[in-house]
Image: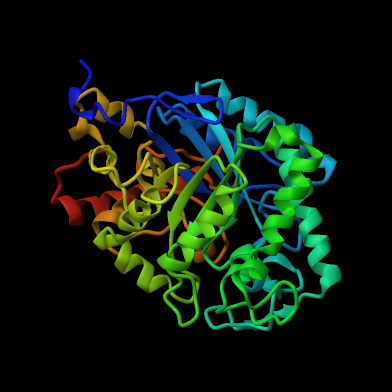
């Protein structure tokens, strides 16, 4: 028997020409399991598993627009024609389970680490990333044009690979966000100083994409930062101005987030207080574009309340769906007691296996017994057994033996 208390999240919504079956999406997750930029079986299996969970859209995160733009050697890349066929397999695998697909694209920018990606680290201006210990090189106008062309090529390839939407990452201190934020952008040329100049690279990308392929209009979503938590960084008031600029280009949706690498501790404090959702509400009040709230949504009850109270049009979940991909179906069928939660949501610092940049070997995994497991030698059977033992120990600490494997 279906749970009737979720009437708001079960309402259909239309974005561009797509009718979403519900208001739940899986937020962008990167599992760092590509091979020389190519989509692999593990990537296809992981995102297919999320599509089966009951979400209306799976967001694939994040694919770089070039080798230089990747944060590691095992990240996906979009753009060059050689990647197209396997990207098509990925989009097709998601559609099989009645879910839309959105692929997130980015360039790591000044927060890149040459130890991880073996590339020169670049940004709009010189910037020293304290958490990594690297100072980036300032991009020349010629190099900016190359990056612009990389984004255009990646967006067009995403359309050719049959993804329903393309999400441009304008947040978390990655390159396009760096151009927007005065904290990073100290340029004095046509890409610096005024907001119009700082937005110029984004407007040039969108205008050129629409000239080359007008069918892409209405299919591009944007991940946006409402707070950089630093002096001269983006804040909610400046973000409202950016949203107005983007709205002229007929965006598909906005996802509202916050924080940089160097201000991660502040964003987690805000996330726990529900500030991310408040940021989403403020953006929803000024735009007709669909707004997605995310950050700390661990159950669909919270998502139902956010939609009912008009904080957002849809909501995204990430770690909770990694820990238990059956979460949505269990909740909708009044089986909430069967849901296996993410340990990290219950005990801070207990587990960050799904955050590959925090792992010394840059691997992705989850220790809950219900989670997806890789089907290659990325994790051996012995390692998986070891993870489950750790989960049981943490589970006992958190629940006092209430949850059993």
Residue 33 vs 98, above or below: the answer is: below
Q: Residue at x 75, y 32 (%)?
A: 160
Q: Is residue 182 left or right of residue 82?
A: left
| Residue toward you, 393 or 100 | 100
Q: Quadrant of the N terminus?
A: top left
Residue 171 vs 313, above or below: the answer is: below
Q: Is residue 364 left or right of residue 405?
A: right
Percent x, y of residue 340: 28, 40
Residue 165's image quarter?
Answer: top right
Percent x, y of residue 352: 41, 59
| Residue toward you, 384 or 89 | 89
| Residue toward you, 216 or 155 | 216
Percent x, y of residue 224: 50, 57
Q: Residue at x 53, y 29 (%)?
A: 100
Residue 216's image quarter?
Answer: top right
For residue 210, say whether it is visible: yes
Q: How is the image coloured?
A: rainbow
Q: Quadrant of the C terminus?
A: top left
Q: Residue at x 82, y 46 (%)?
A: 80
Q: Residue at x 36, y 50 (%)?
A: 285
Percent x, y of residue 330: 27, 28
- Extreme residue toward the right, this view: 142
Q: Is residue 70 left or right of residue 388?
A: right
For residue 37, say whether it is visible: no
- Extreme residue toward the top, this view: 1
Numbered label tally: 0
């Amino acid at each position: 028997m279906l749970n009737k208390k979720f009437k708001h999240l079960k309402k259909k919504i239309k974005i561009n020409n797509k009718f979403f079956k519900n208001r739940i999406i899986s937020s962008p997750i990167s599992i760092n399991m590509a091979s020389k930029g190519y989509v692999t079986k593990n990537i296809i299996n992981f995102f297919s598993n999320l599509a089966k969970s009951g979400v209306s859209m799976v967001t694939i995160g994040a694919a770089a627009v070039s080798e230089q733009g990747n944060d590691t050697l095992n990240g996906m890349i979009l753009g060059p024609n050689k990647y197209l066929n396997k990207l098509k397999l990925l989009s097709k695998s998601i559609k099989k389970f009645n879910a839309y697909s959105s692929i997130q694209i980015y360039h790591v920018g000044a927060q890149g680490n040459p130890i991880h990606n073996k590339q020169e680290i670049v940004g709009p201006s010189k910037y020293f990333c304290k958490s990594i210990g690297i100072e980036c090189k300032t991009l020349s106008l010629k190099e900016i044009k190359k990056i612009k062309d990389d984004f255009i090529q990646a967006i067009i390839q995403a359309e050719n690979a049959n993804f329903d939407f393309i999400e441009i990452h304008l947040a978390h201190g990655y390159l396009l966000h760096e151009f927007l934020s005065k904290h990073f952008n100290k340029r004095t040329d046509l890409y610096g100083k005024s907001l119009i100049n700082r937005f110029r690279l984004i407007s040039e990308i969108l205008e050129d994409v629409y000239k080359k392929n007008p069918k892409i209009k209405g299919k591009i979503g944007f991940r946006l930062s409402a707070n950089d938590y630093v002096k001269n960084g983006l804040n909610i008031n400046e973000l409202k101005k950016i949203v107005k600029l983007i709205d002229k280009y007929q965006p598909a949706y906005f996802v509202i987030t916050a924080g940089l690498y160097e201000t991660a501790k502040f964003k987690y404090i805000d996330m726990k207080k529900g500030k991310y959702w408040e940021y989403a509400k403020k953006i929803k009040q000024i735009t007709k574009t669909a707004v997605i709230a995310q950050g700390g949504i661990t159950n669909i009850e919270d998502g139902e309340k956010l939609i009912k109270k008009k904080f957002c049009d849809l909501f995204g979940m990430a770690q909770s769906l990694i820990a238990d991909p059956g979460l949505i179906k269990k909740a909708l069928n009044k089986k909430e007691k069967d849901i296996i939660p993410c340990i990290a949501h219950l005990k801070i610092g207990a587990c960050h296996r799904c955050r590959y940049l925090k792992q010394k070997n840059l691997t992705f995994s989850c220790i809950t017994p219900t989670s997806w497991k890789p089907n290659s030698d990325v994790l051996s059977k012995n390692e998986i057994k070891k993870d489950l033992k750790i989960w049981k120990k943490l589970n006992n600490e958190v629940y006092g033996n209430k949850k059993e494997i």
